[in-house]
């Protein structure tokens, strides 16, 4: 049993393999945080210290480390929940009503029951732990058992207390084409807020927190949590005047009110969280393993070819078949037809919403292309953007009231499209039927689901920010029940929908429209900290790259894309014989190492050189692979030393090098002495496979 309760003083201790989390109920009935960090001893050792106010201006509520602060009384700190009752009372006063524990195969869940002391309004604090992964999922479930509606104006899923000041906070910033740009900032007095208000999701910040005490990959304390929600989230980090750092995360209260009718309950999205005493690598490994075992669909992801960068909107059956033939010759396993196959879709101006096959482009129907793809022994995938409609589309002409809008305002377009109000039952039903029909009528194995603009003019409902994304999850979940073998890729103008909310509902992320192999190294590095490699789609594309204009050798482009789930997005019909042969070799190599890449442990290796080498290792049981990239070299530049990690000290490993053939080295040598490597020229890269003898 990993959950221990001392009923004498109502103290709870939650243990995972190497961490502990503790809280208790005090004499005021407040749920007070006690500890989060390295594993500690028995629950009996924990006590709730008596609290007295610092001064009349620092009341006891302010200094109490509450597990779930509500709005009310002498509380001025960030609260997790604010509700207004029908009589106008705008505060909550909770009391502790007991707890329950449930157990599953590899998890246990503690639920602490709270209730308002006047209104029949319940708050259940959930702590679901996965001891073997050193992870916990926290959330709150609220329930209105009063006879009247209750307005919920703010709901953050949990509060965390970190017993330090001067922490480093890291997350990502970015925009279209430059997602996942990692930043680190010192936490000081005041608050750091990260959020998304765009509805669809965001390329800007990502819904997670990482707080560390000058940690490295392998050393130092790290506290982290990832919110399982797409769309509008907010997160607050605050170093308080009382010697600790608070974090909370959940639904963004911006323009959002949830109305709970009598009897309604609402489950806030959970936060997957943990503590590492050994740097960022442990955080990454725990999250990756958990995602792999508990969230992602099992199985390896196919090597895909996507025709978007080759043909854009100018798709037709004949050219797509030619591309498919070439893709099969290279070794691709899945052919994805991107935007432009439907309605009057010749550019961004029209077509969205009219999901019939364009007869001019596919005179013999989609079947001709699908049969050709299947005949080439590949799977078939197709692009859709179901949440959107172009003003010129028939769908909009027939149903102008199906978009988010205000009757008295002109609705904004973006990329010449409106957002459908999919929270309306008839719109949801239309989308589900359209997609179900597509999947029933055609042999489709893969859906790339895109969303290319934020939501605006949401109409009178103030819960659509939340409901919109839940409707997307709901449609895909329902489709998967009926079409269980279809894989779904989450795309939103590139990497705009990468989060632990959509992961599991969808199977892959389109990481970024920026397919420049050098820029991707930064994007992939940041992505890898939190999200699993298997879900990271990475394509090799043409040079000069359409965004950066950069020329990068094909080998470097392959190596960069082989770090995730490999895809090819080049105009492969223009490939020279050398490019074709190189691609065939690279794709064949990728298939060999794919289980290690997609399901192994991932290491961001240290680069001891003065030159900017990017070094990464993947290890799965006895087999591994590592990559080295040198985007730019200076005259007289230095080499680097690659020190691998995670090996057995005394075992012998065989490395397959292209320059020196097979090399045998001990785990100790490879991890401590390391391999000296000097790459030459710009955009140089190398990949070496190894296995234990
Ligand atoms: C944005 C996506 O990120 C691209 O990969 C492509 O599918 C286009 N949309 C198509 O319009």
Image: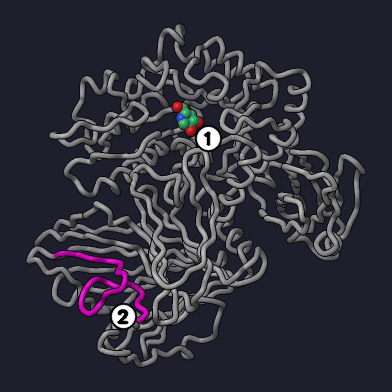
Residue 4 visible within the image: no
Residue drawn 24% across and 53% down?
256
Q: Considering the numbered disc 1 on the image, is that residue within a helix, a strand or a loop?
A: loop
Q: Residue at x 36, y 24 (%)?
A: 437
The answer to the question of whether label 1 and label 2 lie on touching residues, with beta carbons closer than 8 A, is no
Q: Which mark is residue 62?
A: 2
Q: Quadrant of residue 550?
A: top right
Q: Could you tell me residue 124's position as x and y percent? A: 30, 68
Specify whether residue 600 is in view. yes
Magenta segment includes 461? no
Q: Position of residue 579 (x, y in %)?
A: 74, 23
Percent coordinates x, y for residue 70 in the rendering: 26, 71
Magenta stretch: dominant secondary structure:
loop
Furthest residue in direction left, as rendered? 87
Left or right of 320 on screen, residue 102: left
Q: Position of residue 15 (x, y in %)?
A: 51, 75
Which residue shows up at 46% across the image and 49% down it? 499
Classify residue 556 as left or right of residue 673.
left
Part of the protein shown in magenta: 64-84
Label 1 belongs to which residue? 513
Q: Is mark 1 within 8 Å of ligand 1?
A: yes
Quadrant location, the C terminus:
bottom right
């Amino acid at each position: 049993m990993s959950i221990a309760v001392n009923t004498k003083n109502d103290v709870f201790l939650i243990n995972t393999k190497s961490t502990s989390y503790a809280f208790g109920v005090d004499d005021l009935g407040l749920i007070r945080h006690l500890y989060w960090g390295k594993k500690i001893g028995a629950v009996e050792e924990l006590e709730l210290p008596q609290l007295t106010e610092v001064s009349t201006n620092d009341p006891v509520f302010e200094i109490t480390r509450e597990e779930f602060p509500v709005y009310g009384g002498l509380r001025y700190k960030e609260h997790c929940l604010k509700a207004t009752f029908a009589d106008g009372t705008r505060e909550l006063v909770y009391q502790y009503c007991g707890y329950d524990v449930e157990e599953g195969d590899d998890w246990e869940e503690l639920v602490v029951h709270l209730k308002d002391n006047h209104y029949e309004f319940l708050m259940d604090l959930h702590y679901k732990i996965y001891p073997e992964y050193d992870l916990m999922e926290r959330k709150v479930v609220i329930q209105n058992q009063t006879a009247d509606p209750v307005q919920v104006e703010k709901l953050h899923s949990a509060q965390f207390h970190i017993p330090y000041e001067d922490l480093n906070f890291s997350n990502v910033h970015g925009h279209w084409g430059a997602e996942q740009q990692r930043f680190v900032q010192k936490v000081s007095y005041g608050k750091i807020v990260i959020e998304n208000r765009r509805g669809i999701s965001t390329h800007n910040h990502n819904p997670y927190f990482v707080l560390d005490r000058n940690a490295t990959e392998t050393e130092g304390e790290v506290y982290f949590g990832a919110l399982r929600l797409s769309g509008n989230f907010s997160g607050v980090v605050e170093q308080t005047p009382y010697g600790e750092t608070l974090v909370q995360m959940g639904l963004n209260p911006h323009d959002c009110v949830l109305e709970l009718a009598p009897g309604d309950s609402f489950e806030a999205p959970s936060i997957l969280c943990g503590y590492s005493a050994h740097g960022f690598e442990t955080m990454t490994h725990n999250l990756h393993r958990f995602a792999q075992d508990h969230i992602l669909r099992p199985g390896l992801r196919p090597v895909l070819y996507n025709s978007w960068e080759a043909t854009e909107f100018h798709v037709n059956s004949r050219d797509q078949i030619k591309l498919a033939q070439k893709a099969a010759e290279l070794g691709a396993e899945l052919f994805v037809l991107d935007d432009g196959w439907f309605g009057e879709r010749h550019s961004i101006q029209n077509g969205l919403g009219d999901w019939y096959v364009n007869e001019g482009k596919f005179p013999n129907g989609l079947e001709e292309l699908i049969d050709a793809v299947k005949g080439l022994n590949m799977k078939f995938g197709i692009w859709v953007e179901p949440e959107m409609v172009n003003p010129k589309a028939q769908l909009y002409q027939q149903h102008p009231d199906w978009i988010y809008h205000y009757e008295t305002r002109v609705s904004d377009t973006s990329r010449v499209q409106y957002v459908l109000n999919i929270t309306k039952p008839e719109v949801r039903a239309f989308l589900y039927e359209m997609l179900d029909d597509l999947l029933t009528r055609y042999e489709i194995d893969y859906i790339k689901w895109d969303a290319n603009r934020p939501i605006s003019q949401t109409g009178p409902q103030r819960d659509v920010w939340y409901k919109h994304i839940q409707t997307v999850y709901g449609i895909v979940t329902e489709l998967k029940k009926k079409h269980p073998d279809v894989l779904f890729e989450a795309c939103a103008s590139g990497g705009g929908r990468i989060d632990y909310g959509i992961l599991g509902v969808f199977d892959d992320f389109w990481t970024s429209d920026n397919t420049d192999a050098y820029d991707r190294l930064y994007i992939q590095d940041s992505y890898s900290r939190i999200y699993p490699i298997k879900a990271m789609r990475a394509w090799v594309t043409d040079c000069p790259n359409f965004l950066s204009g950069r020329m990068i050798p094909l080998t470097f482009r392959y190596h960069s894309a082989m770090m995730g789930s490999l895809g090819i997005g080049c105009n492969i019909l223009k490939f020279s014989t050398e490019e074709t042969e190189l691609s065939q070799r690279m794709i064949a190599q990728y298939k060999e190492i794919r289980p290690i890449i997609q399901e192994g442990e991932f290491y961001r290796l240290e680069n001891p050189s003065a030159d900017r080498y990017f070094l990464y290792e993947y290890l799965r049981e006895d087999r591994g692979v590592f990559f080295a990239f040198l985007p730019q070299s200076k005259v007289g530049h230095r080499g680097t030393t690659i020190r691998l990690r995670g090996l057995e000290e005394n075992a012998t490993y065989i490395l397959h090098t292209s320059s020196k053939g097979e090399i045998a080295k001990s785990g100790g040598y490879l991890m401590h002495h390391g391999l000296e490597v000097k790459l030459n020229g710009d955009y140089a890269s190398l990949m070496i496979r190894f296995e234990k003898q």
